Image (cartoon, rainbow, N blue to C red):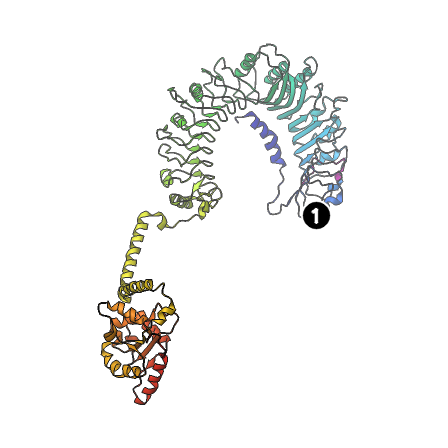
Amino acid sequence: MTKPNSLIFYCIIVLGLTFMKIQLSEESELIIKRPNANLTRVPKDLPLQTTTVDLSQNNISELQTYDILSLSKLRVLIMSYNRLQYLNISVFKFNTELEYLDLSHNELRVISCHPTVSLKHLDLSFNAFDAMPICKEFGNMSQLQFLGLSGSRVQSSSVQLVAHLNISKVLLVLGDAYGEKEDPESLQHISTETLHIVFPSKREFRFLLDVSVSTTVCLELSNIKCVLEDQGCSYFLRALSKLRKNPKLSNLTLNNVETTWNSFINIFQIVWHTPVKYFSISNVKLQGQLAFRMFSYSDTSMKALSIHQVVSDVFSFPQSYIYSIFANMNIQNFTMSGTHMVHMLCPSQVSPFLYVDFTDNLLTDMVFKDCRNLVRLKTLSLQKNQLKNLENIILMSAKMTSLQKLDISRNSLRYRERGIPCSWTQSLLVLNLSSNMLTDSVFRCLPPKVKVLDLHNNRIMSIPKDVTRLQALQELNVASNSLTDLPGCGTFSSLSVLLIDHNSVSHPSEDFFQSCQNISSLTAGYNPFRCTCELRDFVKNIGRVAREVVEGWPDSYRCDYPDSSKGTALQDFHLSPLSCNTVLLTVTIGATMLLLAATGAFLCLYFDLPWYVRMLCQWTQTRHRGRNIPLEELQRNLQFHAFVSYSGHDSAWVKNELLPNLEKNDIRVCLHERNFVPGKSIVENIIHFIEKSYKSIFVLSPHFIQSEWCHYELYFAHHNLFHEGSDNLILILLEPIPQYSIPTNYHKLKTLMARKTYLEWPTEKNKHGLFWANLRASINVKLVNQ
């Protein structure tokens, strides 16, 4: 053990609770906890299978059999901090499995006993008993490991009832009236390894109680007040002197001590010559002046001394005398915390100190300056002091040639690189520099053989490239700084544990896991991760090793940017490879454009798109010319009843059949060969005379679909800009045209033939009359301009 208080805790807790713990099966355990619920009675709704009930910190004043009668499997009952005044132990006669009963901090004055043998833990301390409530039935509790009692009178006759029990721990809380009928030898009959006695608070120690119980290994005394040196302190010092009679006593703890400086030193001197190996004193209030006296270090079994939370109301006393007493103690472990100590002298000769803890004091950089007598010291803690310059600590450690662990966290340390040699002791393996004011420069001066380095909660923004090469470093803690990236392992080749959570890491290096092959634990959560392409490979690597290496995954790893992904877990963040690969994206876009160009060229050739483009241009020009011309004016300007479009191969039928039969009835027909205006383009003539005609007649035949100009005329007639909404097309099917023979670019003709009614030229002559009658009827209109 390194710390004395750790061993004391071990004696009190481990020795006791190891034997007192309740052996409950996880499968059958049912725990009911209702502390601080303002209950006045035991609840009636407790399940029958309940094994543990915690009703502490309530207002229950009575406990009856029927309250717990049905709880046959009850093993633990905690009713501390209630208002119980009377207890009949027979209420537990049906709870045969009850092992742990805590009734401390109540108002119990009387108990009625009943045989019970299953209890392992019985706590009746901090109650209002007059005499210690020890019944003869307690002597049958062969399994009892903890017994807590309270009372103002301790009688040997009562204690003898449990003398034959080997109880691991006994707690005695002495009432305020203790001492009036005192039996000094009453405790000598107790057989226990750990004894804790709580004396009446705020009373001067004038008790004759002999606490040197022969079987006790761990002794704890609380509420010691001896400020009257001629009276009270002599009683207490006499009680401590009797501890020499117990060779088994190894641990002594004093709590809540109020005394004088002289008595304080006398306590140490007396304990120094007892069998005690581990001595702890805490919550001490000192007063009075200190008289100089020699302190004898000889003939001692002491190995460890712990002093915690010391307050003094005297500000003028020989501090150097106090420091010299502690500095020259011939023990291995020394702890002094919370004492407002401002300095500590160097031992006058080579010290046996192996462990020194000066946590939570007021020590400055002058502590152990130029001290060469701590060459055996292995562990030093100067946590939470007033240290400011790391250079001074480096020089101090250089003379501690055996130092392996140094804790100087929670100070105000800075490192300014003033040219002072970086002379850390070569033996240092564990260094805690957390919660200081260190910056990036600290990496340029670190112990070369350090294995565990704690730099969390500083002002580090980056790890410089010219850092000290720490080949032995295995664990690095740089959490709660301002780092923007994960450090590589080029200079930390043995790094296996890295803590870098709560920093400013937004897009970690994707090659971190390749650089740090030996990493076995990475804690990098709670960083402002930018969920962009740069993070994609890192997330992929984490996903591959998350269960084995990454701590806190996936809950503490979330996106912070962009806003659309803020709060999203990194494991749910996905980007396609195409969006993050510039080369692949460029190739894909190029290939897509080439495909679109090829598709466009194919469509142009297959659907005759150039032709439609030319038509669109002409259509646009014509639309522009006629945009502001009223429809009535256009109708007044009609010159023809019909515009006839036909193929040159069908001109004979048009001239010999169509024209004679229409013009004999005063129907004016426009033909291109006789009416088109010379000098104008063919397209302009087509558009012009279609606009001047009431109807457009198309003579359809296999020859028609082979004529490009017929296609023009059909296109413009179908898109007549100035007769929108009118039925201005008349289709005459001169010869049958199979659908499959119509070219692809004649898709409008296919559409018209599919949805419009056309006139079919009959081959029988007797039907010609009806044909011409229908045709004349469809174009019979009176032209304004004849």
Residue lying at the far bottom in this picture: please name it: 766
Which residue occupies the foreground of this view, 13 or 563?
563
Residue 256 or residue 130, whichever sits in front? 256
Query: Residue at horizontal 36%, vertical 71%?
Result: 635
Residue plotted at (54% across, 26% down): 3
Pick the residue in front: 41 or 457: 457
Q: Position of residue 142 (x, y in %)?
A: 68, 36
Amino acid identity at mark 1:
Asp
Q: Which residues are magenta?
A: 76-89
Residue 133 seen by the camera: yes
Q: Does the segment drawn in magenta span residue 79?
A: yes
In this view, 644 is above or below 556: below
Image quarter hosting the C terminus: bottom left
In this view of the protein, can residue 746 be seen by the observer?
Answer: no
Q: Position of residue 358 (x, y in %)?
A: 53, 22
Relative horizontal placement of residue 129, taking residue 730 as reference (left or right): right
Expressed as whole percent of the image width and height from the top left, the position of residue 244 reads 63, 19
* Residue to which mark 1 is pinned: 45
Q: Quadrant of residue 340?
A: top right
- Report the residue at 65% width, 19% height from top: 258
